[in-house]
Amino acid sequence: MSRLVRRFGLVCLLQVICFLAGRGVACGQAKDLYRSAREQMVRVAIESAGVENPRVLDAMRNTLRHEFVAAAHRPRAYFDMALPIGNRQTISSPFIVAYMTESLDPQPDDKVLEIGTGSGYQAAVLSPIVKDVYTIEIVPELGQRAKRTLRRLRYRNVHAKVGDGFQGWPEHAPFDKIIVTCSPEKPPLPLIQQLREGGLMVIPVGERYQQTLYMFRKQNGRLEAEPLRPTLFVPMTGRAEENRLVKPNPKRPTCLNGDFEEKVPKNGFVPGWYYQRQMTVETEAAPVGKAYIRFENKDDGRAAHLMQGFPVDGKSIEALRISAHYRHDNVQDASHGGIGALAVTFYDANRKELSNRVVARFRGDSEWTEVTRSVPVPAGAREGIIRVGLFGATGVLAVDDIRMQLPQ
């Protein structure tokens, strides 16, 4: 089982994108290796997930993501995953960066304000496709590092500073577009005031682990909202996070909408879950209730999955009891190791991965089956992600009634 866990952990966390084209490449060819990895990243993780804007796709192909992460994380720079950048923050996954950039409808003459510079990667992606990018980071260490990186890479139209992003940058307002990469409960008033009439704001809002990515358009001084998709972003820093009205309870982790009975909104995304790929909600012959989810993947290596984040206090909770119903047809492992699975990943307070636990492995054929497993929680765990899907494997997988409970 330990080999399986290690194998799944690699595949799951890397979103089944690999350096296939780079195997055996000498160190002197590193530049070509990264280019091949970027091409693979765009093809498998971004285009296949629905991002179509050619200027955005070109920016993703040409932006050197490995320059925005620490040397230890560079081998994973072009996998579709968030990576830690220090100070409890992460660099967003390539798909999320591409999706948010496309949602912003970037135009060559746009002046864009970014809240939450982080590593500087999002600003770098925007740089070649808009006129100017103004970006603000509240954590001094991250903000100064990002400024140095952007300056070294000669992003001359990116203007960075350290400060409270939720106050905006009034001396350069109004902005045509605003992109926010941390998640408040609602759009901050200064940002609304600094967005020009008719301008767009893309921002994840909501509770800590139940966020929705929204696109707001300013009309007659007010924001008109369009929900895009459920998502999960890192928390805000300092007072803004502490003052949330609704706070998570890490001593009572639970799986929300694990029976998939909540009504699916017009955008087609299942409430409570994020990173939805190649999945539908079915309502015939469900093993529990009226609905279940179904994944189908015909292309080896292509993502088909669903995820949900949750708080957990490893100091208080030694284990979680995970259960689900599943059925699958002709599920075959991906050629590079991707598997069908239900699994849980735990992270510490700095979002460093602590462990991966496979609850169920899906291969071949199976009628409806129920699985229950006690999953140990590392003492240092503060967050977790439950993952279910094919993760590059091919075939059909149906899942229902995913539950997370404290041991009895």
Image: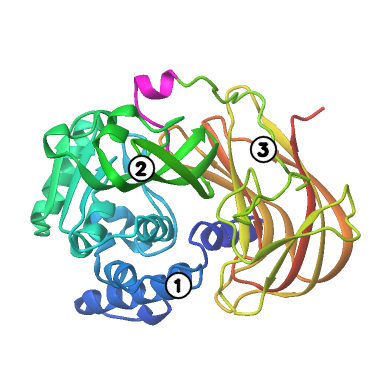
Identify the mark nearer the N-term, 2 or 3: 2
Q: Position of residue 202 (x, y in %)?
A: 38, 47
Report the magenta stretch's main SS.
Answer: loop
Task: Tell us which disc is closer to us: 3 or 1.
Answer: 1
- State the image quarter where residue 293 is shown: bottom right
Range drawn in magenta:
233-243
Judge by depth and name the residue closer to the eye, 399 or 8. Answer: 399
Neighbours of disc 3 within 10 Å: few (<14), some (14-19), many (20+): some
**Which is nearer the eye, 186 or 154?**
186
The CA span between labels 3 and 1 is 37 Å
Give the residue at mark 1: 47
Picture residue at 33% right of the left edge, 74% below the top = 54
| Residue type marked 1 | Glu
Left or right, 396 with respect to 312, comes to right
Q: Is residue 257 above or below residue 139?
A: below
**Mark 2 secondary-structure assignment:** strand
